[in-house]
Image (spheres, coloured by chain):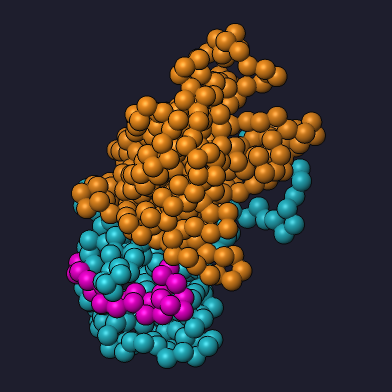
């Protein structure tokens, strides 16, 4: 089996490097990434706190992640496994965050909708990378060379803090959106949907409906 | 008397094992699934997961960065006496959870639901959950305690619905498929998974049954009711025929195994819950004896004939009949 293409990518990628990427490519990252999820977005965007990094010069790679990690008494860090958290919940912040941070790579779990990609990602020249599995936490943890800093852990707790990670060959990630805003997961859903009717044969809708329920199987929960 | 220090040190070991070591039954199941998966992307994902389990064991680091919400299932032999009593037991399990969160390390997932405040140790109000069961034993063989820790992940892949007798098996199948397809898209359920189904009870116990079916039974285990066992196998195949694999990519690996547990319910209803235990099926078990022996295993062996009993009382004749 040949499998998908494998590509090394910088965390401060050029527009040309991003244009090369196709849906389903497997990517390994080199450089600095930082974690930011709802805690960081709310603090930076709603409370207008100063972001404690030079973005995007230091990194254009925003990881939707809380690592399995701890801060030791001497101030050093122990970092074990690293995996992403589901990104669809962050849709309302992602556009303003990309404008503020210059992020070009959004890394997370499960992707976002093509509507999000076309509205926020395409104008900012950004793409989405999904983690694999989920989750290959030990493999991704191996790709982290060092924890460079942790910001806002006092204010947000370890799980929501901004972890700054130095990475080498960190992966695998899968390209889940391209510069045109196409969505890998929606492409796969569309391939699967035509077969669902046959699978549902011999089943029956519940006698007690749920308010707002649909039987449209092309629907998604995100 | 069962030593409280031994309980805590064993609990810490279990926390470590659960987070790092994929149970052999799930690993064998995933390997068998990977061998027949022919979707390109789905196959790549399964191979990456198999490599990930090896990396976790080699490095002694957690399999997944989301290390779930640690919880405890405690089962006591009929003659179990714990040093310091049940309060000491619960303190030891809470302390082990906190220590392992910093020691392994695990992700400190647990926060207050409203204030989002955090002790950074997975301990807080109602956390970790500690659930209890008891087990008959012949005289002189019941002074033991089974500790099972499950670090169940996933905000998705679990659902509940009130069905009714008129919904029948067709309705059960429908809700099963709805749950797998809804949460299988984009791989939100972290499939292929062990799927647990709870049927009956009441709303809360139905959820408990389904969760225990997913987390406390091993791959290949069948319900002792032959008709339910057939349904389990049928549902496993049905799930794998959806056309969807890992991460919601085209494929045929959704369900490593399907387990169904039932409880008596209201005559008018047929409660149903569906639970997906993810690609990192974190569970670890040990039996601790009063004489200091500790026996580690990965099968919780929770659903014994006694746990599924239908009778008022329980004696040797009941046990033999059940077996």
Give coordinates of residue B156: x percent, y percent. Answer: 53, 55
Label total for image: 0
Query: Is residue B259 one of those drawn in magenta?
Result: no
Give coordinates of residue B28: x percent, y percent. Answer: 32, 35
Whether residue B238 sits left or right of residue B6 in the image: it is right
Whether residue B75 sits left or right of residue B269 in the image: it is left
Write down the region rendered in magenta: A145-173
Q: Please, is residue B183 above or below residue A99 in the view?
A: above
Q: Residue, x 47% and y 37% (percent of image)?
A: B83
Magenta stretch secondary structure, dominant:
strand
Query: Is residue A169 one of those drawn in magenta?
Result: yes
Please say whether residue B148 is visible from this viewpoint. Answer: yes
Chain painted in orange in the figure: B
The N terminus of chain B lies in quadrant: top left
Give coordinates of residue B167: x percent, y percent. Answer: 72, 36
Q: Residue, x 70% and y 29% (percent of image)?
A: B264
In depth, the one of A109 and B107 nearer the eye is B107
Q: Residue, x 53% and y 70% (percent of image)?
A: B117
Q: Where, by quadrant of the figure, is residue A122 drawn?
A: bottom left
Q: Residue, x 26% and y 57% (percent of image)?
A: A139
Give coordinates of residue B35: x percent, y percent. Answer: 29, 38
Q: Where, by quadrant of the figure, is residue B147 drawn?
A: top left
In depth, the one of B51 and A66 nearer the eye is A66
Please say whether residue A175 is visible from this viewpoint. Answer: no
The outermost residue toward the right is B268
- Chain A drawn colour: cyan
């Amino acid at each position: 089996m040949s499998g998908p293409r494998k590509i090394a990518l910088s965390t401060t990628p050029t527009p040309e490097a991003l244009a090369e990427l196709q849906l389903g490519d497997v990517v390994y990252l080199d450089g600095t990434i930082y974690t930011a999820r709802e805690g960081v977005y709310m603090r930076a965007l709603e409370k207008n706190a100063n972001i404690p990094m030079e973005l995007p010069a230091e990194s254009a790679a925003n990881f939707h992640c809380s690592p399995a990690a701890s801060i030791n008494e001497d101030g050093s860090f122990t970092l074990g496994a690293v995996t992403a958290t589901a990104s669809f919940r962050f849709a309302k912040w992602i556009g303003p965050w990309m404008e503020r941070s210059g992020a070009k790579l959004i890394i997370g779990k499960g992707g976002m909708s093509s509507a999000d990609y076309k509205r926020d990602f395409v104008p900012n020249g950004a793409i989405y990378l999904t983690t694999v599995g989920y989750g290959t936490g030990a493999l991704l943890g191996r790709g982290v060379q060092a924890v460079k800093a942790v910001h806002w852990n006092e204010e947000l707790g370890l799980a929501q803090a901004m972890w700054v990670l130095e990475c080498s060959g960190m992966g695998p990630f899968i390209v889940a959106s391209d510069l045109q805003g196409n969505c890998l997961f929606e492409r796969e859903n569309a391939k699967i949907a035509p077969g669902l009717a046959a699978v549902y044969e011999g089943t029956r809708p519940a006698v007690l409906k749920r308010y707002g329920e649909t039987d449209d199987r092309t629907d998604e929960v995100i | 008397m069962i030593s409280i220090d031994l309980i805590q040190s064993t609990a810490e070991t279990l926390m470590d094992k659960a987070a790092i070591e994929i149970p052999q039954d799930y690993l064998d199941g995933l390997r068998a699934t990977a061998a027949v998966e022919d979707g390109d992307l789905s196959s790549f994902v399964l191979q990456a997961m198999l490599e990930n389990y090896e990396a976790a064991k080699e490095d002694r680091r957690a399999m997944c960065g989301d290390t779930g919400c640690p919880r405890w299932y405690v089962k006591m032999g009929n003659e179990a006496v714990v040093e310091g009593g049940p309060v000491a037991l619960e303190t030891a399990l809470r302390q082990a959870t906190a220590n392992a969160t910093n020691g392994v390390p695990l992700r400190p997932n647990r926060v207050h639901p409203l204030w989002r405040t955090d002790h950074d140790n997975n301990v807080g109000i109602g956390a970790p959950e500690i659930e209890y069961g008891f087990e008959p034993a012949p005289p002189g063989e019941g002074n033991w305690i089974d500790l099972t820790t499950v670090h169940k992940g996933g905000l998705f892949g679990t659902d509940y619905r009130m069905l009714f007798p008129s919904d029948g098996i067709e309705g059960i199948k429908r809700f099963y498929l709805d749950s797998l397809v809804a949460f299988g898209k984009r791989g939100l359920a972290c499939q292929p998974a062990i799927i647990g189904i709870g049927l009956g009870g009441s709303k809360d116990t139905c959820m408990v049954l389904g969760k225990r079916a997913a987390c406390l039974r091993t791959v290949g285990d069948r319900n002792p009711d032959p008709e339910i066992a057939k349904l389990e196998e049928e549902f496993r195949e049905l799930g794998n025929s959806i056309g969807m694999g890992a991460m919601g990519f085209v494929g045929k690996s959704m369900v490593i195994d399907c387990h169904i547990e039932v409880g008596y319910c209201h005559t008018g209803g047929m409660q149903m819950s569906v639970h997906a235990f993810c690609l990192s099926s974190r569970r670890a078990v040990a039996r601790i004896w009063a004489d200091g022996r500790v026996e580690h295993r990965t099968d919780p062996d929770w659903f014994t004939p006694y746990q599924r009993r239908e009778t008022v009382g329980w004696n040797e004749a009941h046990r033999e009949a059940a077996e």
